[in-house]
Image (cartoon, grey):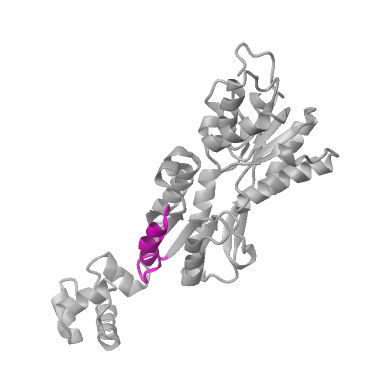
Amino acid sequence: MANITLEDIARQAGVSRSTVSRVINDQPNVSDAARNRVIEVVHRTGYLPNAAARTLASQRSLMIGLVLPQTVSSFFADPYYPHLTQGIAQACNQKNYTLALFLVETKEDEEKIFPRVSRRGLLDGVIVQASHHGDPMMTKLIDSSIPLVFAGRPFQANHFSFIDIDNVSASYNAVNHLIRLGRKRIATIAGPSHSTVGIDRKAGYVKALKDRGLELDEALIVEGDFTEAGGYYAMQHLLFRKPDAVFAASDIMAYGAMRAVKQANLHIPQDIALIGFDDLPLANASQLSLTTVRQPVIKFGVAAVELLIDLIENGTEPPRRIILETELIIRESCGASYRGLDHPL
């Protein structure tokens, strides 16, 4: 059947060539009877004219989607997302899957993208970056019944498969390190309170203070938005509260905080110790290297693909969850390795 054509399929199924094309490309306006006849012929002949027909015959497209509820500008400004995408792309290449990337910024984006993501036969499954509670795109994906893996813990964690790190424990260890260094007024630039990652990293901060007998001062907690500008403005606000240390919930916000400290003619770590979160390449690339929590972002992406393929091949029940390890990387900004820098920040 190597030389079979769409015309041959149409003749055997008793339909027109255009009907065969619509069925193969999963388009509407085809009766169930006609569609079933075309599918039967495709299965019987084993004809695979293109990727769409392979999907029809095998019920697998070998394509997965990555949905990021981020603006295009923030996607490229925050190193986390390119590194996550790099890990996902590497795993897709190794597993012979094609990756489709969807950046959702506006309601209009959502309305355009969701029908493509949820369209039957187009994607075998989807990886979605966990976003804020009540995100309509996430709700629609959940309701679509497509195999789904969350990158980050979703709010309804018991019902869905996800991959994450232990954000509470990682943040606890970072703040505890500052306490061991003798810092007493430890502030935090937290992540958004409507996201699980923001909630969990703040919880680790609070737990560390309480366990070590330090007073929790709400004035030392400022919410950021995981941007450099957010870290900068949060630090400007905190400077009036005179902290002697700051735990920032991301490296990007930590670097915004560094900029604010420098403009205030203060020095890190002498005046204010600083710890970030992520350990992306920029953390060790500046004049003053950043103490930070290292999470394996590329490995995170690889593991997300492997988990999704497991759901595709073996079913989505029961939900699976993977928690990866983190490590506190001690550099200059916390003061532990400070030895009288010639050019303090």
Q: Position of residue 60 (x, y in %)?
A: 37, 68
Can residue 188 be spotted in the picture?
Answer: yes
Magenta region, residue range = 105-124
Q: Which one is in front, 202 or 302?
A: 202
Is residue 116 toward the left or the right of residue 3 in the image?
right
The quarter of the rendered structure image containing the N terminus is bottom left
Q: Position of residue 206 (x, y in %)?
A: 75, 44
Is residue 306 toward the left or the right of residue 288 in the image?
left
Q: Position of residue 19 (x, y in %)?
A: 20, 79
Q: Residue lying farthest right?
A: 213
Q: Image height check: is 103 above or below 50?
A: above
Give the residue at x 65% y 23%.
332
Give the residue at x 27% y 74%.
27
Count of numbered circles on the image: 0
Give the residue at x 37% y 61%.
113
Is residue 95 toward the left or the right of residue 271 in the image?
left
